[in-house]
Amino acid sequence: MRSAQHDLVKVTANAAPAFSLCAFFPARAFATAAPLNFLQSSGPKADSILALTWGLLAISIIVVILMTGLVLWAVFRSRSPSHLDNGIQPDGHRPNNFNIFGWGLGITTLVLVGCVVWTMVTLAAIGEPPQKPALTIAITGHQWWWGIRYLSDKPSQVFTTANEIHIPAGVPIKVTLRSADVIHSFWVPALSGKTDVIPGQINTTWIEAKKPGTYLGQCAEYCGAQHAHMAIRVVAEPADKFEAWRNDQLKPAAPPATDDGKAGLVMFERRCAGCHTVRGTEAGGIYGPDLSHLMTRATLADGTVPNAGGYLAGWIADPQHIKPASRMPRVSLSGDELQAVTSYLRTLH
Ligand SMILES: [Cu+2]
């Protein structure tokens, strides 16, 4: 495990070429994952998007340099003063500029049409995954977190989690997107381009990670006060590790063993169950994230703080301090109650 300090340096350094996008997301510094860098791809879909990105960028740069050069040349070239008043040549003829206009228009049209064709070809190529998706994940955008449901033909294989998406590496995964409130956008740059998440509509996309690793994403459509704290964390794992994770997630939460934990569960069912589900308990609320296996997630409140140390108790004690305007209200708890609820949540592996 690397230190947060180390990662902060790494994140900032790696983000520099990507116009320091990461500097806007300092909360991600604690994450032991590749920074949110849209100039790195790690899957077949993102590979072709990245080639297009570089290609269009290069063409744009060449055009800007060329046009700047031509403008400067036109401004500073030496010419006879008689040129200046009416564009009529000293010998009385109007200059024939058609050739220049013709060439300029022709080349511009070719370049633009080329860009459009390349873009269309890329869009067509990434529209469908190369093989049948191994898995379908139904994702719901909420202000400001993601609900994640793993679908299956077998009802016993269906489960819900939040914010952290695990996938097997090396196979395409189908993702369906819906919104619980406003327009969001699902974006994991290393794996795929953006797909809008629109209320009243189901959009579909797919992702594939070439190799195991953690890939960060971000809601890419401004969606309110905590839009910047609406992170996406995709953990791609080898097939066997993914299976183990899935089997663990499928299980209901184990009953707490300690007295503190038992008291915490009672308190949780009383104070938190209206919004949160912990499978295997009375708590079945769906307004907030599913907490059945909370402690397997790396962050709290969707990338806002690490799920470590005192952050859990801090979050429960005052979510509005950590994530102002968050849809989780401050629930007033005595010191003992907070302690009990926290130690109960810590058992949710
Ligand atoms: Cu959003």
Image (spheres, helix red, strand yellow):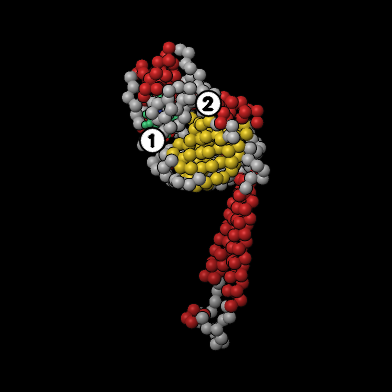
Q: Position of residue 37 (x, y in %)?
A: 55, 42
How packed mark 1 is, by other alpha carbons closer than 10 Å (few <14, some 14-19, many 20 or more), is some
Whether residue 173 sits left or right of residue 346 in the image: it is: right
User: Which element carries disc 1, helix, strand or loop?
Assistant: loop
Residue for badge 2: 296
Which residue is at 50% across, 31% downward?
161
Residue for badge 1: 326
Whether residue 69 sits left or right of residue 198 in the image: it is: right
Residue 334, placed above or below residue 298 = above
Q: Which sits earlier in the primary sequence, circle 2 or circle 1?
A: 2
Kindly indicate the quadrant of the structure image that contains residue 79: bottom right
Which residue is at 60% across, 39% downward?
173
Q: CA distance from mark 2 to mark 1?
A: 22 Å
Residue that sits furthest to the bottom in the current view: 92
Q: Position of residue 236 (x, y in %)?
A: 60, 34
Front in this rendered view, residue 84 or 208:
208
Whether residue 247 sits left or right of residue 197 in the image: it is: right
The three-letter amino acid code for the residue at tag 2 is: Thr
Whether residue 243 sits left or right of residue 327 in the image: it is: right
User: Which element carries disc 2, helix, strand or loop?
Assistant: helix
